Amino acid sequence: MKIRFVSITAVLLFFSSCYQITSINTGRSFPDYEREFFVLNGLAETVSVLEPSYLRLHDDAFLTGSAPNHILYRNDLLYVTNSTDNSITIYNETTLEKSDEIYLGSNRNPWMVIEAEGTGCGYVPNFVAGTVSIIDFGSGDILDEISVGNGPEGGCYMNGYVFVANTNYDADTFTFGEGSVSIIDTADNSVIETVSMGVGSDPQSILAFPDKNEVHVILTGEYTEDDGAVVVLDGTTFTEKTRLAIGGSPVGTPGSIDRDNSLVYLCGTAGIMSYDYENLTVVHGSDDYILASGGDTYMDAAVDPVSGIILVADFSQSEIIVLDNTDYSEIETIQGSDGVQKFFLVAE
């Protein structure tokens, strides 16, 4: 059995890639490391595996579906969300062989699978449909589909509730309306509250902090240098406790949380930022990037608490940038597969 750590950056891939690799061997041809990052390659539509202690990368370990956007690890299985295939493909983590597939129906554009711990169910925000599909992990059946807000993307589970970020994106005008967070009670799968984040807020990702009884909603904004904030919601009353202006149009993932140092790293339009989640203060904002992008597109930043590194997914250059997590100096840059997008740590 392995402990699941996931990192997920909210990136919309509506297109099918012309870069897909079709000549790889399906199955694990390298050791099943005690600790390994699964690297999602958006353009290649593959998953690579990185062993973090010695930075050994095994490119294109297996093929995904079309426009993969997220991996969930649960009970020795990997659940890959394929946005334009409208499906969840399931792989054996030990062998990396495909074992099953869940088709959600046409015009769904699923974003990720949120595991509601203790329920045996996964909640899948469907960007195009404006719904959340509920899947049974045991049978693979779709149990229900709930209407939420327009353009749902990221989310999280905490204390009996699933929190879903509604971007309210208008594809006709290329603008964002009033963003919100839908809160689903997993006891009866009803939407018990919808919390406004404001017009143009574009909430894409939500992080759970159960020890603080808080969820942090990352507002990407409308992609200007000054856009971007972190909204802290109380986990019981669902009211806004504070709002941090961080700029840089950020997104965040659970894997970007450094719990040893109480930091969250965020990927922005021009670099990597951070904030202190205990003191709720900005450490590195858009005026003080940890790593400026120089025009490249950073999609994810993942912390490895054992080796003391931060992995940065450079989508534009298809590279993995390795930083020291104390002084943020660059340790190495690893050439990856096409469109390095997200990291998901699995540790025994």
Image: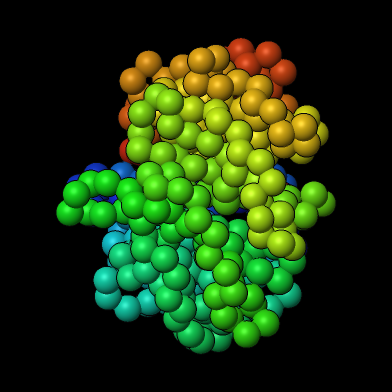
Q: Is residue 283 above or below residue 151?
A: above
* In-front residue for pair 216/10: 216
The answer to whether residue 128 is visible is yes
Q: Residue at x 48, y 68 (%)?
A: 124
Q: Residue at x 69, y 46 (%)?
A: 241
Residue 194 image position (x, y, % from top left): 53, 65
Q: Is residue 5 above or below residue 316?
A: below
The answer to whether residue 298 is visible is no
Left or right: 195 with respect to 132? right
Residue 71 image position (x, y, % from top left): 52, 56
Left or right: 138 with respect to 106? right
Residue 270 image position (x, y, % from top left): 41, 23
Left or right: 98 with respect to 107? right
Residue 195: name its quadrant.
Answer: bottom right
Q: Residue at x 17, y 54 (%)?
A: 172
Left or right: 255 with respect to 91? right
Q: Is residue 90 above or below residue 196?
A: below
Q: Is residue 34 above or below residue 77?
A: above
Q: Residue at x 48, y 34 (%)?
A: 228
Location of the N terminus by quadrant is bottom right
* In-front residue for pair 239/29: 239
Residue 263 image position (x, y, % from top left): 70, 32
